[in-house]
Amino acid sequence: MTNNHLTDETLQAFLLKESQDDAVAAHLSACAECREKLENYQRLVAGMQKMAPESFAFDVTTVVMDKVVRYERQKKRMQELVFWGLLSILIIVIIAFSIPFLSQIRAVFTAIPVFTMLLIIGTGLVVLLFLIVDLNTQYKRKAEKIFQNKLQPIR
């Protein structure tokens, strides 16, 4: 025995006008069982359209954005902690490996004239300053891109 009735998906597509098949319309005019299913779906859709949307006693956007901001702060704190921890470990390792060579390093720096030493230190400080300014500029650019659509929480 074969089942010649329309599937629920076909009936729903026909009801929502996603499918306009003449064979479906012809079957509905001939089959009382499928027509009854379609009428049940029509009543269900009509009932759902009459339902009022739920309203919240609070602003969902504010709650979500507060959670996003809190998460970002926590993530940033964790990244800073990891950065400073790794930097501290790196400095300790460098110092530990350089202890045997301290007398030789001191000899190199005492052999250089004062003017050359000031030039080296000044150049290092200028390069460091440019790197810090560049990092700050990149940070501001990224922050503007993130918040250009003004998704910041309402206060």
Image: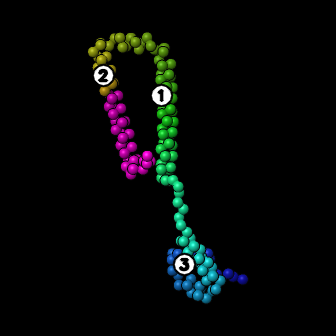
Q: Measuring 36% from the left and 41% from the top, which residue is drawn there?
A: 140
**Is residue 107 visible in this depiction of the protein?**
yes
Q: Which residue is at the front of the view, 102 or 124?
A: 124
Q: Give the distance between the C-alpha atoms of the residues marked 1 and 2, in whole angstroms.
A: 23 Å
Q: Are marks 3 and 1 in contact (CB under 8 Å)?
A: no
Work out how far the residue at label 3 is from the one at label 2, CA to CA, in angstroms. Answer: 78 Å
- Residue to which mark 3 is pinned: 14
Location of mark 1 (residue): 87
In the orientation shown, which residue stands out farthest toward the bottom?
A: 30
- Residue 22: percent from the left, percent from the top? 53, 84
Quadrant of the snapshot with the N terminus: bottom right
Nearer-the-camera pick, 42 or 155? 155
Instruction: Give coordinates of residue 127: x percent, y percent.
Output: 32, 28
Amino acid bearing label 1: Leu
Name the secondary structure under disc 1: helix
Q: Residue furthest right?
A: 1
- Extreme-front residue of the structure: 57
Residue nearer the viewer, 104 or 12:
12
The part of the chain drawn in magenta is: 127-155
The stretch drawn in magenta includes residue 101 = no
Residue type marked 3: Phe
Q: Main secondary structure of the magenta part?
A: helix
Please determine whether, in this image, residue 19 is positioned above or below residue 58.
below
From this viewpoint, is residue 34 visible? Answer: no
